Image: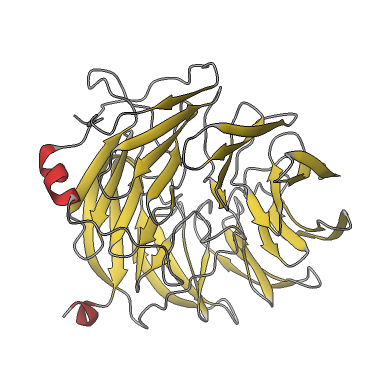
Amino acid sequence: MRATGLIPTIPFVIAVVAVSGAMTCGLLSESALRAADVEAAAPTESSWPSFRNGNLQQGIAGSALPEKLEQLWKIDVPDGVVATVAIVGDYVYLPALNGHLICLNLKDGSEVWRYRSIDDPEEFAPGFRATPRVTETMAYVGDEDGVLHAVDRVTGKPKWKFTTNDEISGCAAIYNDKVIVGSYDSTLYCLDAETGEEDWHFETGDRINGSPGVAENYTFVAGCDHHLRVIDIAAGTEKSDIPLETYLIASPAIWGDELYVGTQGGEVVAVNWKTEEIVWRYTAESRQMPIHASAAVTEEGVYVGGHDKQLHAINRKTGEGLWTFPTRASIDSSPVVVGDRIYFGSGDRNLYGVSIEDGKEVFKENLGKSIVAGPAVGEGVLVIGTEGSQGELFCFGSKSAEQ
């Protein structure tokens, strides 16, 4: 049932498709048997239920990791992994480029269920480049053809689908009973989480690449139109339009009244979304290269890698550089703060851990293939995938904790 390739994006008319619970939609028979054992539980502080671990998109883990990371398991992922996984409870939710959303047992990586992005087993399945947003009962994830899938967490069966006019590469946000997601069709959508029916949509000037952040009753969207927009979620209307002078691939991180995001122009920008003012702009001293990774932000610092092959630590309040950590290739992997350490991957095939205080290396593991996905840290483990035709998914933690 594995797709052997991808199909080009095909425009669709916007529609919601209700899906019968009786449909299998690519579920494997053995997976269906195991699905009965899945317990739906609400995400907790130790979970990683979305791309940057919550609507503020700060990239901070609520779960601790052992001082010494050990590989617990790995699995093959044909066509590779470019998106961060989600971790909730005892399960990992893996979005794969071969068009499958796969629920795995966190303990050993065994498959629980598998959902395919299209029903026809003879057709190539649009891949998943977006991280799933996992709730107590559902997993919401967009695909390369612009379809947002709502999948039952327990059974792996589809509940509904909503079709946009182009690719969805960003993770959806959940606000009360709404799902908010952006599309390459230059539109931000707000849907009913239960039915998939559209509540409103807002058109921007160009495609939306990242994941919408949410703070208070507002959502934030930016992309290729060089603008950061603040949208009232209840009304679907624009509160603010803040010019950024360059386009964004990354998703904004939110800390209080400020947003932090790297740009295609190679800057990291701090924006006060309430006053609509640029607080500071940071540019690397060495060379200005695009930043596609999304930043992690804490009370003290902003941390992000770029195509200059370095991880940058920036003073959150002043915008001054604190330290840099060099790798041997571009960094598209969005970093995660875990206590006093930062973990991220690089195109040089290594998973790194560095000290948040001074940027000194404390962990390094060669995973054999390029890494563009960010790590997910939840329930005491770190899970990350590699890209390529023979990609893999790795889980790191403590072997002694398993016993």
Q: Which colour scheme is used?
A: secondary structure
**249, above or below 324, in the image:** above
Q: Left or right: 378 with respect to 15? A: left
Is residue 267 positioned above or below 379 on the image? Answer: above
**In front of the other: 246 or 271:** 271
Q: Where is residue 294 in the image (x, y as percent from the top left)?
A: 59, 54
Residue 99 location, quadrant: top left
Residue occupying the point 45% across, 47% down: 131
Where residue 102 appears, as percent x and y from the top left, is 28, 45
Relative depth, front residue between 149 and 94: 149
- Residue 287 appears in the rendering: no
Please report the residue visible at 11 percent of the width from the left and 38 percent of the height from the top: 29
Is 57 placed left or right of 136 in the picture?
right
Q: Is residue 19 left or right of residue 59?
A: left
Determine the residue positioned at 27% across, 78% down.
398
Residue 12 position, x and y percent, is 51, 17
With 340 as the anchor, is 203 left or right in this view? Answer: right
- Which quarter of the figure has residue 273? bottom right
Residue 14 lies, with reference to residue 113, above or below; the image says above
Residue at image coords 89%, 58% = 275
Q: In which quarter of the image is the N terminus?
A: top left
Tell me the quadrant of the picture where the C terminus can be found.
bottom left
Q: Where is residue 110 in the image (x, y as percent from the top left)?
A: 17, 55
Among the 4 quarters of the image, the one containing residue 37: bottom left
Residue 293 visible in the picture: yes
